[in-house]
Image (tube, helix red, strand yellow):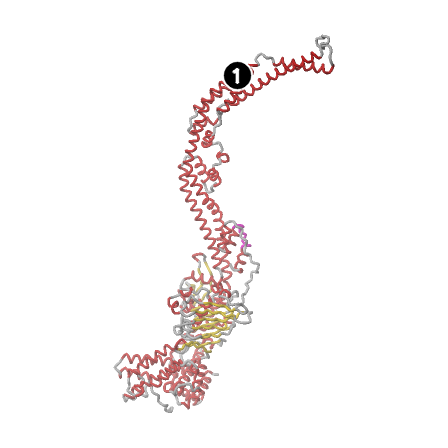
Amino acid sequence: MDDVLLRIVLDRLDEAGLPDGVESLVLAACDGVEQLTAALGGEVVGPTVIETAGRVVEPAGAYLGSVRVEGFRGIGPEAVLGLASGPGLTLVIGRNGSGKSSFAEALELLLTQDSRRWSTRSAVWKDGWRNVHHPGHTHIQAELVVDGQASVTKVTRSWEAEAGLEDSTVTVQQPGAPRADLAALGWERALVRYRPFLSYNELGSMFDEGPTKLYDVLALVLGLEELAQAEKALKEARLERKRLADTSTTALDGLRAALEASDDERARRCLAALNGRRWDLGAVRAVLVGDPVGVLGDAGSLGTLRQLANLPGPSQAVVSEITGQLRDAAGRLAALHGTDADHAHRVARLLGDALAFHEAHGDGDCPVCGRAAALDATWRAEATAQRDRFSQIAADVEEAIAAAGHARRAAHALLLPAPAVLAEADTVGVDTSGLAAAWSTWARGSNLDNLTELADHLEVAIEPLTVWLSEIRDAAARELTRREHRWRPLAERLAAWLPSADEAVAAATAIKQLQAAQKWLAEAATGIRNDRFAPIAEEALENWRLLRHDSNVNVAAVAFEGAGNRRHVQLDVSVDGVGSAAFGVMSQGELHALALSLFLPRATLPESPFRFVVIDDPVQSMDPARVEGLARVLHRTARERQVIVFTHDDRLPEAIRRLGIDARILEVSRQPESVVHLRAALDPVARYLEDAQALVSTDELPGPVAARVVPAFCRFALEGAFTEVARQRLLAGGARHVQVEERILAAKTLMQKAALALFEDADRGGDVVGHLNRQFGSWSATALQRARRGAHEGAEQRHLRNLVEDTRRLTQKVLGR
Amino acid sequence: MTPPVATVSSADLLTWAEEVLHARTGVLAGCWARAVAILGRQALEALLRELWAARNLSLDGCSTRAQLLCLRAYIDDPDLAADIDHTWSALSNACHHHPYELAPTSQELARWLKAVRRAQRQLAIGSPAGAKAD
């Protein structure tokens, strides 16, 4: 998007205060589809904020210096259209087929990047672009005079012999720069937007295709297509996401039916997660991952089955170890049977104390029984042995008791009741009655204390328990596997669906934002459109006021209305003050004039790099009054721009001369062999006189040709002068243009024209000679008669100079100069 | 009355017209088209004069329009008469100034001269000039 437009959008965004997400989508869309895609993908798109002020920067303007054409369309050998490279009006007049339109077309083709567009125009164009009389080399060259550049830029497009229309070479030679291609001009976009070319056909077809097409063509000037593109990007992004969401939802419908048909609790969980408008995809994903703790836990039939499959219980190996310990402890206790561990312990401690006493006090009497000298070395040795023996006895007994306790606790620890899950087993179709019975038998052993009895119980009860345990575990595992087989396809379908569901969920958010962004942009575009179009509309209406002249059709306003498929250009038209449907009431000429009114303003937009506008034959189907209006409009445009108008007859030049508009008029003529000749055109009277004078003075002509043709040129000059005077007098008398032209056309002969000019009555031809004799003298009547007769028969060579001179005097008298 | 002007044959006038039509430069560069039209019309009018003279008819005072009406009565070929009539009208039109009209194109002129040449041949007046032109 261009800077000017982007700045306007940014300003409006500032005021709008949209949510951040929506605002960034608008900006991204203004930057193009790629940026929008990136923004929707979650990338932070740096806004392309330009720091230029919101003012239009005028590009360096280009004027045309000349156009050279060789071997193209109606032009054979090289012909040069030399132009004054500055603001002003240039008319190029030439009959249809004179090659004038070839210049206009050549210029447009020269500057158009994509010449394929031309070859698709029509077969006539495609095959007829080369001049038939000039096979071989074809080239078009324009000299451009660019503001601020000291020398000209030359743009040349050339074709080798036999090359197709599309196979041309273009070079651009800018001052002080190497040769480059057309892109160096940087006009590709400007040529579309401000296209400085207008042809009769375009003017004619502008309204044919309806107000929607007209909208599109006019909107080009405003650069609004970029807003439309941004809008379109938003719309397409939204539709794409809508499709994603729809696809995912549709896929879910089938999936949902399959889930409902399944008795798997995972299916039910997924269904629950996917019911309602917000899908809990996290829950579905957790089910699929099969996280039993996090989501399913131990609950539910699958939990039960999983517990059963991994049912904890005593194993044969552990039981064997513990029974071994039990029996070992029992054996050791039996071996120490009758031994008083307490007695032994106390004796050992008593002897220990006595030995310590002896150690401290030395040999002596027994302090307990008083036996004299009982404590001596002998006693000491015996007492030490005794103490050690009793200590050993006490330790053995204590150890055996501890081992027995340990073994018993271990046995009791094994003899737990059946896990609670067994009670739920029947809900998952596993019969655990055998296991329950075995387990209850097993658990009953917890009441036993006797080591041998415990060991016996364990050895007996473990066998059925392990058999049942293994059976139940296997049964649960089988059931799990069976359910897994049935679930897997569903899980796979869910897994396959999940990514699209993720996209759909993301899309749902994006759709809302895109919708908001599009809505905002559409409304903003309408505002921007009307703001930007206002000055153009004003200019167009001003043009129309000049052009409409006698037309009873008034155009009060031009505006863009509607949007999308209903976009159109609204013209408020009234006929004789009564509102009316726009196009139906207007003549072809009025439509042309209106089209021209609308399209000329784009040539004067300051942001256009083109300081020239080329208009090809705007006056066809225009009546004289409107031609006069056209002359005024062109004059107005030419104050600031180089206006080049090609026209097929003398109506526009006549109006321009009559209105005293400063213009350069060139005449194109095409001689045999497509030799195209250009010369500056005088007004018709001066031109005829100049031609007559030249023919008298030359010796290039064969035989008495001058004598044969000079009188006819004098008659041309007189007819031209009388016509001009007649038009002035009749118009000054208040007659309408159309009537004036009708009367002038009806006056065919010299005498009728003279009478119309002199008496405002073409039927008074018989009074002309007498009037001239009286008014100007006999020389004038003689000149008139010689010119009249000589046009048919020629004149005598000796009279020619006088005839031309007298004719000149007479035209000056008649014209009042 | 204006003094008599030297008579030039239709054939000569037509030949000059054709020469001018193909001249591209010099004094004729800008005015050749009208000059060709003038010479062409004079050639056609001279042809009529030669026709009446050959038949010893005096139509000198009659307008060309009147002479063309007579032509239909005097020659057996109505197509030729119509062709001459049409060509003269076109040439005559090109020999008057009409508001806004530009000079005729070279194609138009070439067509008209061909018609005059055809008329000269088919009328075959028998004068040396007319015979030569064949």
Q: Is A665 within the magenta?
A: no
The prevailing secondary structure element of the residues shown in magenta is helix
Determine the image quadrant of residue A354. Answer: top right
| Relative image position of residue A541 (x, y in whole percent) | 48, 66
Q: Is residue A54 left or right of residue A263?
A: right
Above-or-below relation of B59 to A469: below
Residue A64 visible in rendering: yes
- In the current view of this chain or complex, which residue is farthest to the left? B76
Q: Residue at x 50, y 34 (%)?
A: A293
Q: Residue tagged by mark 1? A: A450
Q: Nearer the viewer, residue A38 or A637?
A: A38
Disc 1, SS: loop
Image location of residue A473, percent across then percent down: 45, 28
> What kind of residue is marked 1?
Asn
Query: Residue A97's quadrant in the figure?
Result: bottom left
In the figure, A108 relative to A786: above or below?
above
Q: Does residue A382 sit above or below A503 in this rendering?
A: above
The answer to which image quadrant residue A589 occupies is bottom left
The image shows residue A208 at horizontal and vertical percentages of: 40, 64
Total marks placed: 1
On the question of residue A743 being in view, the answer is: no
What is the chain identity of the residue bearing mark 1? Answer: A
Residue A198 position, x and y percent, is: 45, 68
Is A604 located above or below residue A744 in the figure? above
Front-lying residue, A162 or A658: A162
Q: Which residues are magenta?
A: A13-21
Decide if residue A320 is on the left or right side of residue B66: right
Magenta run includes residue A14? yes
